[in-house]
Image (cartoon, coloured by chain):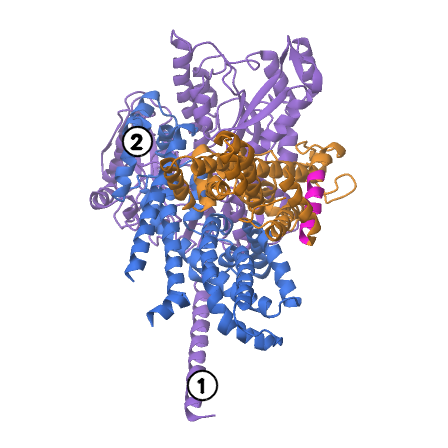
Chain colours: A orange, B blue, C purple
Amino acid sequence: MAVRRGVLRRLAAHPTGRAGLLLTGALIAAVLVGPLVIEHSPTAIDLARKLRAPDGANLLGTDQFGRDQLARVLEGGRRSLGAAALVMVGAMGISLTIGVTAGMAGRLLDAVAMRVVDVLLALPGLILALAVVGVLGPSFTNLMLAMVISSWAYYARLARSYVLAARQRGDIMAARMAGIGWPRIVAGHIVPAVATQLIVVATLDLGGVIVAIASLSFLGLGVQPPDAEWGAMLSESRLFFSTAPWLLAAPATAILLAVTAANLIGDALRDVAAPGREGTG
Amino acid sequence: MRGTLRVVAARLGQGLAAALGASVLVWALLPLAPGDPARRVLQARGIGDPQPVEIEAARVELGLDQPLPVQYARWLGRAVRGDLSESYESGQPVLEELRTRLPATALLAVTAIAIAGLGALPAALLAAAYRGRWPDALLRGLSLVGAALPAFLVGLFALQVVVLGRGWGRALSDGSPGQVWLPALVLALARIADWSRLLRASLLESLESGFILVSVARGARRLRVLVRHALPNALLPFLTAVGVGVGALLGGTPIVEAVFTWPGIGSYVVSAINARDLPVIQGFAALAAMAYVATSVAVDVLGGLLDPRTRKAKT
Amino acid sequence: MTAARRASLARLIAVGIVVTTASGAGQRAEAAAGPEPLRILNSFKAEAIDPAKPGAHWCYEFAYCEYPMQAADEGGLEPWLLSSLDPVDELTWRLTVRPGITFQNGRPVDGEALAASLQRQIDLFAQVTPFLPGATAEAAGAREVLLRTSKPTAIVPALLAERSLFPVYDVAAVERVLAGGEDRDLAGAGIFTAPYAVTELTADRLTLERYDGYWAGMPALPGIEVRFVTDPQARILAVQNGEADIALYPPSEVQDTLAGRDDIFLRRQEVAQETLRLAPNVGQPPLDELAVRRAAALAVDYEALAQDVMGGLYDVAQGMYPSDHDYSLVTQRTDPAEAERILDEAGWVEGAGGVRARDGQPLQLILLTYPQQPDTATHAVAVQDQLGRVGFDVSIRQVEDVNATITEEPWVPPPGSPVAFGCACIPARGVAPRLHSLAAMRARRALRAGRNRTLDADRPSGWEHQGWDIAVIFNGTLSLTADLKPFPVVVGPAYQGYEVSPVRRLVTYQTAPAS
């Protein structure tokens, strides 16, 4: 906990980090608070007001069904950012489990686990995600599942190396010598330390996850109509480029902002808490 | 040389293992797949309304009545002999369909890698040479934007602004070299952003770690110094990162292919996914794994050849 | 300048002159040749050339095969490759071939050739069998064929015009090619009689060339190229960019982007031949209740669906058929107030969130859509909204295979027996063979479904919730007509004046760009 707070503080001190945190904060606030403030629903049809340019009633205009674009962008934000967080949590959970098991258990288990990880790592992530969605069928849940499956291997490998490094730490060895059992050490010391390091690494990839979700939804392999999602909204509005450009501008800007925020934080993190260097808080 | 061969052989073995692993994963997910392949095959054959008897017969014919491990073993047996079974949609052999589309994807990928490399190199050199001044800041800003732009978004805008707006390029590609430049450029953009930043960092590091006098602050001189001394040392760690980036680039090809209607494997797989054509997806997963490993082997070998240390060792 | 440099400069200039003249000459030659080949973008692949295989029926739309009879644009059936078709007795028909017709490979079409063509389709093509089981076709003269059916079949004229069943082709040539090769080798074998001949069929495109010896006249175009492009937006962009002339199956939102453009135009049929239907699952609650069905039918705003949702691309559905067909009745109207009254009377009381409930059961519906027909999704969203206003709680579910879903899960045809399907659909005026045959196929399905469901002693266990209530189906089972869809195409400037055939014969030998 102390480690995490230290990292956050250092991030806030770093200029890029500060910018990233502010932008992220603004986005999350908009996505969570927005639906409470805006009276339009993202799926309510109003054919009398279709394809209106941004005006007083619809701040970002309406689409071919008369649905309010601002509401849809915010709803899409909730979906994309929520999905990205879920994917990260899922991937880290699995990789932490496998990584800790591989690092702490015997050589056989370690070897087997790492073989599996190597095989999964040999596939470009998006290709694996495509294959998984292909089998399970296009849906938002399957999209998230596919992304978890295609990303956990990378973190598992890292987790294992962090575990191996942690085992050599002075305080761990002291605890062992004092007679404290491995389970308590693992649960109390190793897992939290490794988890923190993993979170730092995962945050670096957050932008990529958001892009991947939008890309797969753009191809029609994620969210299904009438649910709102940035990539899907862009895909549905392609023909309106010259006649209703606001339909494309809003989700495009949203994606840019979200990914830039994630990248800014990632850049700052790289400077502030380089992976491999243990956070000492 | 023998060492390199051994490494290559080990990596190719790894490629086969990866292909095997990918296929196991895809098959393991099959019980979760919705829909009935037997019915789909019958519909593709024109029997729009099959009787339960016909569905049963098709199921037996396709071997779908066997338990899953047996089906997998059968598929594997055919796969190692080069037979990736037939597409549900078209009835054509999957390997044939993938093979006819491979050149287009290869052209796109190779061109994109070349563009990314050729774009990243001068950008990184300039940024390192004029470090702290406006070219460096410009590069930093551009690569931040470039990394944040998803390829499908850039492609979408490129289609509207470049193809429809200015009349360059085609909305419907036919896979020929004359039309590859725009999709390849779109595909390469994110890599240029990444690689130029990486190479810049690598260059600066090798500058500082070396014995080169950097008190000569004039830009042009510094550039020559960079190219002649820093670049060779910086290339190796850079190429390692390139190897990883190639994976991301390959992963991005289906999206760019779909946006530009580029007749490669990626767009084919996307439509196979929409058509729920499982044999194509199974074959694609295995082939993509092998192709990716082969590419990273090639990149590693290239890196080894270019490594000034191994070159010096040979002379 | 050195001598060497001067020489190479001279060479460069010479080459430049030659290249410019050559391209200029090429362009001049091109300009003299007449219209360019027609470039069409389709979303479906032609899968086979051999008419006995499924997926070969595109030859109807793109004028590379012809039929003994033909549905005329104005309605009705007329002899086409035949000069006459006469019933002899209740099991026999006499077909007389028009003189002067040859296959594209030069062989004349006589009685023998026609008989062989009919017989091969009867024997090998699965879709023929339900209509003409055990039929025989025999040559009975130089240009005559006798078609004998196993039972009285009044619809033989329509069958001979139906787009997938009996294209006329050179059986000897087909068998010769297939003996040593496969289906795609039939390209270039000239097996049909049509104005355009297949020269190549690949996974990406179908290439057709003019047949100079066409019996009805010289075809206007040097050739046709049909490209298969699955992305509907890409098809439109290509026409916009001048890379194609006609794009089929445009996405419905294209209607909203057309105002004031001069690079793409929307052309549609005068009269809709196809429909988008709402098929209720009457085998389970709540739609097993008449009141609920009536309320749902009154709550749908048909006019909004056609005008607002589809931007005027569709025609308003007032009944089962287009209203200008003389046998069509107005059976559908929109009256949400009446719908609410009916629901109130049936005991469905409005509750929390505007959703009606009765005895604690909310009035919930599941609306099915399928991705192969994107308009189902658009309609579903609108219908969900419209039904919601009278108190239904509608959720939308997308399924991969709507036919599978509605036939696997028990489906009860409306009371009145399956036989009603068969009769009610044969139009008094032979409007379009397609509509008729579609009805016949639905009749078959209903018959089978009926046999399984109502005549068998053992019913499926209970009528538990089968997971769907309304399926939005294109060209599907008889039910509520949500919308009438005149087949639309998007064309480029050269084909602005293109008329979409009411019977979907997209290309004829006279199709040409506006000059």
Q: Residue furthest front?
A: A178
Q: Is residue B33 magenta?
A: no
Front position in the image: A64 or B122? B122
Residue that appears at 38% across and 50% down: B293
Q: Which residues are magenta?
A: A16-29
x, y (%) of residue C225? 42, 52
Residue A68 appears in the picture as rendered: no
Residue that appears at 48% across and 20% down: C424
Front position in the image: A45 or A145? A145
Label 2: few (<14), some (14–19) or many (≥20) C-alpha neighbours in 10 Å: some
Residue that appears at 49% across and 72% down: B229
Give SS at disc 2. Answer: helix
Residue C160 appears in the picture as rendered: yes
Residue ID for mark 1: C9
Amino acid type of the residue tagged 1 in the rendering = Leu
Where A260 sits versus C468, above or below? below
